[in-house]
Image (spheres, helix red, strand yellow):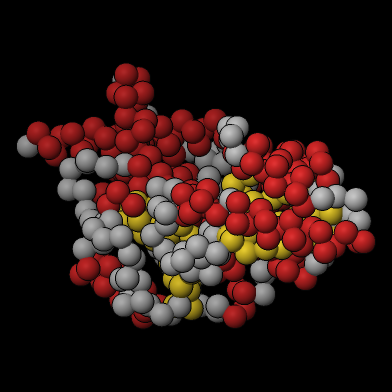
C-alpha cells in the first residue's frame, strides 16, 4: 500500500536535486512503479520517468505531445495496460499544463488521483517558468494540432483537410522581430488559422483560402509591416512540414541587400540557399557551358527554361512541387523539362548531374548579383 505522506517526502527531496522535474518523476516511479509525465500548456513534455521510453510513445520520442496521442489519452486509449490519472496544472493567465500518471493497479485509483493533485501543486512553479515566454495563449488541443501539422505528425487528423478545404499559406515570425508581445494581428488578416509557438518563433497556418484571398493575405501582412517569411499557397496538408523547413531556412537569412519585411517563398527560397553556399562556389571558380546554352535559348526565344530548371532542381526533381512553385500545370512543366533536356543534352534526373547543375546555377546567379552591385 502506497502512502501519500511518503510521496510528499520524496517530492521535497527531489526538488533539491537537478533537474527537479526529472528527479521527481524518477523517484515517484521508483516508489510506486507508475510512469510520470509533465506536459506544459503548449504541449511540450518538460520531463518524464525513464520507464516511459519503453512504450515507444511518439510524444516521448519528440518531447512534445502529438495531436493523435493527445486525443487517445483523452479517450483512455493510449494507456494500453495502464490506467490514467490526469491532473491540470493551472497557472493564471496561461494555458493549463498537465501531470500524467500511468499506473497498472486499478485498486489504487484513488491514491494515484490524489498523487496527481499533489504533484500538480508541487510543480506549478516549474510550469510557470516554462510558460512565461509564451506569446500566444491558446487551448492545448489547438496548439497540438498546429504543432503536429508543422512537424509532419498527421496521424489521426487527415479528416481536417476536408474540413479546411481550400488553399494554405504558412507564415513564420521570429520572436526577436515582434514589435509587441501579443500576436493580435492574425485575426485582422484571415479568420481561419492555427498557430504553433516554438522557443524562438511563431508559425501560423492560414487555411480555407481561395485564390482571390491569397493576395489579400500578402497585402495585409505587408501593410501591417510584419517581419516574416511566408510560403506560396499550396493545396495539400501533407506539404505543411516541407514548407515549414523551407521557411526555417529563409528566416535564417538576413542582412542581405534589399531585404524585405515580408520574405515570399518564390523570391527568397532560392536566394536563401545561395547564401549558405556562396563561399564554396566562389572558391570553385567553375562554369558550365550547358547552362550558357540554356540562357542563350531563353534570350533568343523568350523562354524561361533556366529559371524552370532551377526551381525543378531546388524542389529535388519533384514535378508536383516544382509545378506548384512555378504556378504552372504539370504538363506544361513536363514540356519545358523536355525542352531543357534537348537543349543541354544531359539527364537532369541523374543525382550527380542535378547537383552539378544546381551548383553552377547558384554560382552564376551570385556572380550576376555581384556585378549588379558593382554597377
Task: Tell me, yes or no, if residue 375 can be seen here.
Answer: yes
Where, by quadrant of the figure, is residue 290 drawn? top left
Residue 364 percent across, percent down from the top left = 29, 34
Quadrant the C terminus occupies: top left
Q: Is residue 155 above or below residue 2?
A: below
Relative placement, left or right, of 47 versus 332 is: right
Depth order, front residue of 243/114: 114
Q: Is residue 19 above or below residue 284?
A: below
Q: Residue at x 27, y 35 (%)?
A: 366
Depth order, front residue of 297/316: 316
Count of numbered circles in the view: 0
Depth order, front residue of 36/180: 36
Q: Residue at x 22, y 40 (%)?
A: 255
Depth order, front residue of 67/30: 30
Residue 65 percent across, percent down from the top left = 64, 55
Residue 47 percent across, percent down from the top left = 63, 44
Where, by quadrant of the figure, is residue 29 drawn? top right
Amino acid at each position: 500500500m502506497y502512502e501519500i505522506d511518503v510521496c510528499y517526502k520524496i517530492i521535497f527531496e527531489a526538488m533539491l536535486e537537478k533537474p527537479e522535474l526529472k528527479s521527481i518523476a524518477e523517484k515517484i516511479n521508483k516508489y510506486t512503479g507508475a510512469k510520470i509525465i509533465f506536459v506544459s500548456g503548449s504541449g511540450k513534455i518538460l520531463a518524464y520517468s525513464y520507464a516511459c521510453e519503453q512504450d515507444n510513445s511518439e510524444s516521448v520520442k519528440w518531447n512534445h505531445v502529438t495531436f493523435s496521442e493527445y486525443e487517445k489519452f483523452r479517450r483512455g486509449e493510449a494507456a494500453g495496460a495502464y490506467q490514467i490519472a490526469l491532473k491540470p496544472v493551472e497557472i493564471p493567465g496561461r494555458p493549463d499544463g498537465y501531470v500524467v500518471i500511468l499506473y497498472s493497479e486499478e485498486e489504487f485509483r484513488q491514491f494515484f488521483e490524489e498523487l496527481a493533485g499533489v504533484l500538480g501543486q508541487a510543480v506549478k512553479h516549474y510550469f510557470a517558468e516554462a510558460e512565461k515566454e509564451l506569446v500566444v495563449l491558446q487551448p492545448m488541443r489547438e496548439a497540438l494540432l498546429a504543432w503536429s501539422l508543422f512537424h509532419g505528425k498527421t496521424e489521426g487528423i487527415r479528416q481536417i483537410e476536408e474540413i479546411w478545404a481550400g488553399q494554405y499559406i504558412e507564415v513564420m515570425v521570429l520572436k526577436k522581430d515582434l514589435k509587441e508581445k501579443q500576436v493580435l494581428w492574425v485575426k485582422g488578416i484571415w479568420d481561419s488559422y492555427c498557430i504553433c509557438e516554438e522557443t524562438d518563433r511563431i508559425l501560423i497556418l492560414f487555411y480555407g483560402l481561395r485564390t482571390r484571398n491569397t493576395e489579400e493575405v500578402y497585402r495585409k501582412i505587408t501593410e501591417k509591416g510584419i517581419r516574416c517569411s511566408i510560403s506560396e499557397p499550396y493545396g495539400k496538408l501533407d506539404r505543411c512540414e516541407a514548407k515549414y523547413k523551407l521557411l526555417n531556412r529563409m528566416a535564417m537569412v538576413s542582412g542581405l541587400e534589399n531585404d524585405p519585411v515580408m520574405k515570399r517563398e518564390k523570391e527568397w527560397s532560392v536566394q536563401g540557399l545561395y547564401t549558405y553556399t556562396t563561399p564554396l562556389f566562389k572558391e570553385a571558380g567553375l562554369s558550365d557551358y550547358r547552362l550558357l546554352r540554356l540562357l542563350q535559348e531563353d534570350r533568343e526565344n523568350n523562354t524561361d527554361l533556366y529559371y524552370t530548371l532551377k526551381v525543378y532542381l531546388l524542389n529535388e526533381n519533384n514535378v508536383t512541387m516544382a509545378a506548384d512553385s512555378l504556378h504552372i500545370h504539370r504538363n506544361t512543366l513536363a514540356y519545358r523539362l523536355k525542352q531543357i533536356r534537348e537543349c543541354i543534352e544531359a539527364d537532369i534526373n541523374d543525382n550527380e548531374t542535378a547537383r552539378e547543375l544546381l551548383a553552377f546555377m547558384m554560382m552564376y546567379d551570385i556572380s550576376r548579383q555581384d556585378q549588379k552591385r558593382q554597377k
